């Protein structure tokens, strides 16, 4: 497996089936051009398109410093349960450490056992203290 940082809209478009919705070129450009935004793509031997991705956003606070927010993780169905998700999370954690982040966090849907297994396999721990409160501005 090869994990590479996405640097072009074409790479994100090739990963299109992994995303929830179609890649919009103007949003892809904005993401790629924004400091602290990271998207790593996983390629398996023989696969023409990426088989997985993880995205992360560095957040900085005046009294907490920098930490990495793991925004999204996806692995194509035929490639699941092969350690690709874990490897992507581990690589994002490595990048976070390289960038001086003191930690990394992710919100997980209740009952998403596959995601929880990937995060725990990559060294993450559920501290049991989090609820997600969301605003929808669409």
Image (cartoon, rainbow, N blue to C red):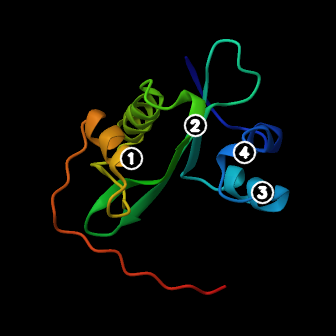
Residue 115: numbered disc: 1
Q: Residue at x 56, y 85 (%)?
A: 136
Element at label 4: helix
Would you say residue 41 is visible in this rendering?
no
Q: Residue at x 49, y 32 (%)?
A: 80
Closer to us: 62 or 115: 115
Q: Is residue 44 above or below residue 115?
A: above
Element at label 3: loop
Task: Quickly name the residue at label 3.
Answer: 22
Label 3 with label 4: CB-CB less than 8 Å? no
Considering only order in the chain, which callout, 1 or 3, is on the residue closer to the N terminus? 3
In this picture, residue 138 sits left or right of residue 124:
right
Whole-percent x, y for residue 14 in the image:
78, 38
Residue 77: numbered disc: 2
Element at label 2: helix
Element at label 1: helix
* Real-space Cα separation, disc 4 to disc 1, in angstroms: 18 Å
* Real-space Cα separation, disc 3 to disc 4, in angstroms: 8 Å
Closer to us: 13 or 97: 13
Task: Quickly name the residue at label 4.
Answer: 17
* Real-space Cα separation, disc 3 to disc 1, in angstroms: 22 Å
* Real-space Cα separation, disc 2 to disc 3, in angstroms: 18 Å
Give the foreground label among 2 and 3: 2
Residue 20: numbered disc: none
Q: Is residue 109 above or below residue 95?
A: below
Q: How many marks?
A: 4
């Amino acid at each position: 497996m090869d994990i590479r940082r996405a640097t072009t809209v074409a790479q994100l478009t090739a990963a299109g089936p992994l995303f929830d919705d179609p890649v919009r070129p103007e949003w892809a450009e904005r993401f790629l051009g924004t400091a602290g935004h990271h998207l790593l793509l996983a390629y398996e031997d023989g696969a023409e398109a990426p088989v997985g991705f993880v995205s992360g956003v560095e957040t900085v606070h005046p009294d907490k410093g920098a930490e990495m927010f793991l925004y999204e993780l996806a692995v194509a169905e035929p490639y699941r349960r092969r350690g690709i998700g874990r490897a992507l999370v581990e690589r994002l954690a490595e990048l976070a450490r390289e960038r001086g982040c003191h930690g990394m966090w992710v919100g997980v849907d209740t009952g998403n056992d596959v995601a929880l297994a990937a995060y725990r396999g990559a060294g993450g721990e559920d501290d049991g203290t989090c609820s997600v409160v969301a605003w929808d501005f669409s």
